[in-house]
């Protein structure tokens, strides 16, 4: 089975599909920095079709499966929340639907922020569902948390799974995965970058951190020395009030650089390499880009990425539901 990777980012969705034997025929991505990372992983054999809103579907190969994490800023609680009225990012769902119809794509998995579900009192999401239904697809949707899929990251996203109605009958039954049977990564197995920056008095930003700990929201609540005794505790400084987590990290986002953690009695800054592991990327992929892509770029790109383990688990259930193959037997062999 073949697929094209839309709004590809750095390929989190692609890895999930390729792990199950699907074959990529090309991708669509407008961020040149993300494309550089993508090419580092996958090489230059496939074409980047560029801006999907400018793609002539006749120039695309025939493919069975669409995967895409379409831009989410316009539906996010930290974004503009203007939704489908956004003349740039909010309109991309229309471009995806046009490609689905023009290429008669059989199956798709699309991902977006949870905020899409309730945007404009649910009207935006209903519009999206109607677009896909009118295009000829039976659509299932559910909010899933990456934390339940083998990675220690709290990341809630809405996933939409579509199958052409003409391919199914009344006996067709798809369910989103309830139990993840793959590798379970611990926080300790992800926070392993020996080159992660130690956050200490030597940095000018450390004084800012001390003032932050003593602001009106945090004053009297935290003691630096006590925090440093809690090995692998995670500190999120994105909000005005400090948030401390154990055994997990908050949602990685493109603009989120305020995540610290405690290791060996010192504060360290989450690195791009570590964020890839928190998104379920295989170690070999994380190692490929560690010295080739700047740390700040990797942090941005992984914040935009799809969690590979979630996409793989959803795809496995879909392939089993359509009787494409006995996925478990294939993987075991």
Image (cartoon, rainbow, N blue to C red):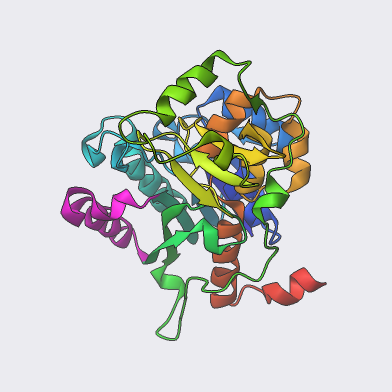
**Residue 89 at x, y = what percent?**
34, 34
The quadrant of the picture occupied by the N terminus is bottom right
Of 218 and 72, the residue lying toward us: 218
Q: Nearer the viewer, residue 143 or 34?
A: 143
Q: Which residues are the magenta region? A: 113-138
- Residue depicted at x 83% and y 72%: 333
Query: Can residue 229 be seen at all in this image of the molecule?
Result: yes
Membership of 121 in magenta stretch: yes
At x 58%, y 29%, the residue is 34
Magenta span contains residue 129:
yes
**Taking 38 as reference, is 22 above or below it?**
below
Q: Position of residue 74 (x, y in %)?
A: 30, 37
Question: Looking at the picture, how far across and down is residue 276, in whole percent?
Answer: 64, 41
Q: Main secondary structure of the magenta part?
A: helix
Residue 28 at least partly seen: no
Q: Position of residue 51 (x, y in %)?
A: 46, 30
In this view, the residue farthest toward the bottom is: 171
**Left or right: 102 in relation to 231:** left
Residue furthest toward the top? Answer: 204
User: Closer to the camera, 102 or 292?
Assistant: 292
Q: Is residue 13 left or right of residue 164?
A: right
């Amino acid at each position: 089975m073949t697929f094209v990777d839309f709004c590809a980012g750095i390929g989190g969705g692609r890895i999930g599909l390729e792990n199950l034997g699907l074959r990529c025929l090309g991708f669509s991505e407008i961020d040149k920095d993300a494309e550089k990372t993508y090419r580092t992983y996958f090489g230059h054999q496939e074409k980047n079709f560029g801006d999907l809103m400018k793609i002539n579907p006749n120039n695309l190969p025939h493919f069975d499966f669409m995967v895409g994490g379409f831009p989410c800023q316009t539906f996010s609680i930290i974004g503009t929340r203007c939704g489908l009225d956004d003349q740039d990012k909010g309109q991309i769902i229309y471009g995806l639907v046009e490609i689905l119809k023009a290429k008669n794509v059989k199956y798709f998995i699309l991902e977006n922020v949870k905020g899409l579900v309730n945007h404009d009192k649910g009207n935006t999401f209903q519009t999206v569902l109607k677009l896909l239904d009118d295009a000829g697809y039976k659509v299932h949707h559910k909010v899933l948390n990456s934390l339940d899929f083998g990675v220690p990251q709290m990341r809630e996203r809405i996933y939409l799974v579509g199958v052409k109605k003409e391919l199914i009958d009344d006996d067709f039954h798809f369910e989103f995965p309830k139990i993840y049977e793959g590798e379970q990564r611990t926080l300790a197995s992800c926070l392993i970058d020996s080159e992660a920056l130690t956050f200490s008095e030597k940095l000018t930003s450390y004084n800012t951190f001390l003032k932050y700990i003593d602001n009106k929201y945090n004053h009297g609540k935290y003691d630096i020395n006590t925090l440093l005794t809690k090995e692998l505790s995670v500190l999120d400084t994105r909000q005005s009030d400090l948030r401390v987590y154990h055994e997990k990290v908050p949602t990685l986002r493109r603009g989120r650089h305020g995540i610290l953690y405690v290791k060996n009695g010192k504060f360290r800054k989450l690195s791009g390499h570590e964020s890839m592991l928190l998104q379920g990327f295989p170690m070999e992929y994380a190692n490929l880009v560690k010295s080739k892509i700047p740390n700040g770029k990797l942090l941005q790109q992984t914040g935009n990425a799809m969690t590979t383990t979630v996409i793989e688990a959803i795809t496995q259930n879909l392939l089993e539901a359509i009787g494409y193959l006995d996925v478990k037997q294939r993987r075991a062999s």
